[in-house]
Amino acid sequence: MSKVECSRTMDMRVMPSMCDENSLMSIPAMLDMFQDAAGTHAESVGIGAFDLEKMGLFWIVSKVRLRVNDRPLVQEMLESTTWIQPADRVSCERDWSISKDGRQIAYVRSIWAALRRDDFRPGHMADFYPDSDFTIAPPDDIPFTRMGKNFEGAEPLGEYRIRSVDIDRGGHMNNVNYVRAMLGCFTCAQLAEMDIRELDMQFILQCYEGETIRFVKRPSEEGLMEVGALNEDGKVCFMAAIK
């Protein structure tokens, strides 16, 4: 593949639908823009959702870390760039950034896998993933946050019943909607005080329309807090470290 194919850059405008009560681009909107950029680039190089369907595979994302340096205002123009890193046997990495006037506004590092539809086992990247020995930029050297799945005794935050509008093409709750539901457990004043600059997420189990998930929180030594989403069986389906 050429270097152009291994990355994709697009100009994006911050639309009113992407913004919060202060007309600043919201964190879920940043993650939506990342997913849109990833999907557009993947389709252009033959590894999009429709391409994988033909091979009996579907994409899942297991880890995402968003670092926010600034939140742009409504109607501001941004440069969105996504690029892929070389893959290992059963997983791959995609990075993304948005910049304004040459200054990085936000950065995402993410880990993906492709599961087989017949048995939900990982497909081998060598069978379909682009052969890329280079990248436009290496991933940052900050490891993903290690979080334990035991949230016993954690403080309740709220509950959320998964609706039809939360479901994506895979038939389960879209990754960004976990974040929307989680942030919706806080008031505007609380979110302003938190001033989130980093969100480290792990997607563990799939949840479906009609299920109710329960959010709980606990203090974290390295960040502001850790949040877990528990399904109706009490199993952790989503975790986030908020800094």
Image (cartoon, rainbow, N blue to C red):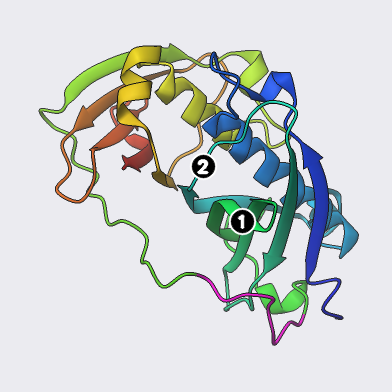
Relative vertical location of residue 217 with respect to residue 123 in this rendering, above or below: above
Residue 114 appears in the figure:
no
Q: What secondary structure is marked by label 1? A: strand
* Amino acid at pointer 2: Asp
Marking on residue 103: 1
Would you say residue 126 sits in the magenta stretch? no
Marking on residue 86: none
Q: Pick out the residue farthest to the left.
A: 153
Badge 2 vs badge 1, beta-carbon distance below 8 Å:
yes
Image location of residue 135, percent across then percent down: 68, 78
Q: Give the Cα separation between the discs numbered 2 and 1.
A: 10 Å
Image location of residue 174, percent across then percent down: 60, 32
- Look at the image and tell me in which quarter the N terminus lies: bottom right
Residue at (66, 46) in percent of width and height = 34
* Magenta residues (range): 131-139
* Amino acid at pointer 1: Arg
Judging depth in this view, the residue of 206 and 21 nearest the camera is: 21
* Residue linked to disc 2: 70
Classify 10 Å Cα crowding around label 1: few (below 14), some (14-19), many (20 and above): few
Q: Is tag 2's residue or tag 1's residue first in the polypeptide sequence?
A: 2
- Look at the image and tell me in which quarter the C terminus lies: top left
Q: Pick out the residue farthest to the bottom.
A: 133
Please give left or right for residue 120 compared with residue 142 in the image: right
Residue at (60, 50) in percent of width and height = 60
Relative vertical location of residue 104 with respect to residue 23 in this rendering, above or below: below
Image location of residue 234, percent across then percent down: 28, 28
Classify 10 Å Cα crowding around label 2: few (below 14), some (14-19), many (20 and above): some
Q: Pick out the residue farthest to the front.
A: 101
Would you say residue 135 sits in the magenta stretch? yes
Residue at (59, 60) in percent of width and height = 113
Q: What secondary structure is marked by label 2? A: loop
